């Protein structure tokens, strides 16, 4: 057994993370979603209601809150297409203010946050990251380019890296989402979460399976960025080129491969992975708006899409919970999706 597989996050670690991040992330509600034609009760975990509009604040806060004052003073860096960027920027500002560290901007206090973003990141996410006081460095569309640039800046400036997913404390932070699902719905039978780098799915699955072993946990990703589904079938990590994963509308799920620690958790705790089409993602966005009055971004709609269109690939259930991982969608895209013909 590898060192990584031996260090799967424990329930105690997840509970400690929940206590730690309570002042920054919120406990989001489970909202009933009476989807037409879907058997069983469906509930949506509304991570789109987090302060940054996405679950990523959980892991970022859990990691940054454990840095020393000296590390906070050095500043933090990450590489992200948008939601993790906002999570790091938000948490860095809050934690820096706690330590009285001068911010990057004279109008606020906070820990300096540098975010390496792809050139195709949604403008709404880039603008929100800048508004939180972070410095944004643009690179190409490949996730490998983001990582390489971040490593270069670490060597130059000594920043502390806050990984987007392949990190034990990031996984533990995201796992608090699964903890809350079981606390709110103790008899849940099926839990679905989006998967890209794997931080959310690995954390949610670890929490759910350790609290309710009989529940089934499934990951969901776009067909156009189905590297984790292929990895799950193959039993090893498979990487897809950026020109393939960048095709999907779900910009938060364009990572080229799942993380090593994340894959170890997925192999230990996840029962299956389903892929959904672009049309199904759009239809799920409309269904979420209509039934739960939530605004999902495309990445946040994939778990619901699996329930709506891939019931044959899922186990039977009485109560299912699907994570709406984020709601940071450009107004123009949302309007297009909501008004397009459905025939």
Image: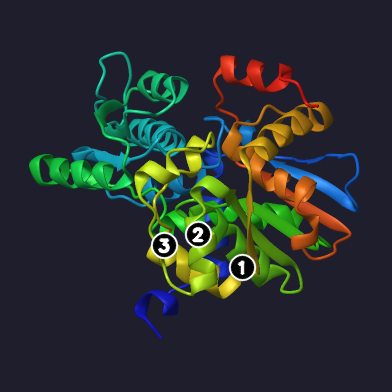
Identify the secondary structure beneath mark 3.
helix
Q: Residue at x 20, y 46 (%)?
A: 148
Q: Residue at x 75, y 53 (%)?
A: 310
Asked whether disc 2 touches disc 3, contact meaning CB atoms under 8 Å apart, the reply is: no
> Mark 1 = which residue?
270
The quarter of the picture where the N terminus appears is bottom left
Q: CA distance from mark 1 to mark 2?
A: 12 Å
- Numbered mark located on residue 78 in the image: none
Q: Residue at x 50, y 59 (%)?
A: 228
Asked whether disc 1 touches disc 2, contact meaning CB atoms under 8 Å apart, the reply is: no
**Left or right: 231 with respect to 291?**
left
Q: Quadrant of residue 288?
A: top right
- Where does residue 230 sit, x and y in percent of width and height? 51, 63
> If you read the primary sequence from the N terminus, does the residue marked by circle 1 or circle 2 appear first?
2
**Residue 334 drawn above or below residue 284:** above
- Numbered mark located on residue 228 in the image: 2
Disc 2 versus disc 3: nearer the observer: 2
**Left or right: 239 with respect to 322?**
left
Q: CA distance from mark 3 to mark 1?
A: 17 Å
> If you read the primary sequence from the N terminus, does the residue marked by circle 2 or circle 3 appear first?
3
Q: Residue at x 52, y 53 (%)?
A: 226
Identify the secondary structure beneath mark 2.
helix
- Numbered mark located on residue 168 in the image: 3
């Amino acid at each position: 057994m590898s060192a990584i597989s031996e260090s799967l996050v424990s329930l105690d670690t997840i509970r400690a993370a929940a206590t730690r991040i309570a002042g920054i992330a919120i406990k989001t509600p489970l909202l009933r979603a009476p989807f037409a034609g879907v058997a069983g009760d469906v509930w949506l975990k509304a991570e789109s209601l987090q302060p940054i509009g996405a679950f990523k604040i959980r892991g970022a806060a859990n990691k940054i809150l454990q840095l020393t004052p000296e590390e906070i003073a050095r500043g933090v860096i990450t590489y992200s297409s948008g939601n993790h960027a906002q999570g790091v920027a938000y948490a860095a500002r809050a934690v820096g203010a706690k330590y009285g560290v001068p911010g990057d901007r004279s109008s606020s206090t906070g820990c300096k946050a540098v975010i390496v973003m792809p050139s195709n990141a949604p403008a709404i996410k880039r603008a929100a990251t800048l508004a939180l006081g972070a410095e944004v460095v643009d690179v190409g569309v490949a996730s490998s380019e983001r990582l390489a640039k971040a490593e270069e800046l670490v060597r130059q400036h000594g920043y502390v890296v806050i990984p987007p997913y392949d990190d034990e404390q990031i996984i533990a932070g995201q796992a608090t989402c699964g903890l809350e699902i079981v606390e709110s719905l103790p008899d849940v039978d099926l839990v679905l979460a989006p998967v890209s780098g794997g931080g959310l799915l690995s954390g949610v699955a670890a929490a759910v399976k350790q609290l309710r072993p009989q529940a089934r946990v499934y990951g969901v990703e776009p067909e156009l960025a189905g590297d984790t589904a292929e990895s799950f079938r193959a039993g090893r990590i498979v990487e897809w080129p950026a020109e393939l994963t960048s095709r999907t509308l779900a910009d938060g799920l364009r990572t080229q491969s799942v993380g090593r620690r994340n894959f170890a958790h997925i192999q230990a705790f996840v029962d299956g992975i389903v892929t959904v089409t672009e049309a199904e993602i759009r239809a799920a966005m409309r269904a979420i708006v209509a039934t739960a009055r939530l605004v999902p971004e495309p990445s946040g709609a994939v778990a619901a899409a699996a329930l709506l269109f891939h019931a044959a690939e899922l186990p039977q259930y009485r109560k299912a919970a699907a994570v709406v991982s984020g709601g940071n969608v450009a107004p123009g895209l949302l309007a297009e999706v909501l008004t397009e013909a459905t025939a």
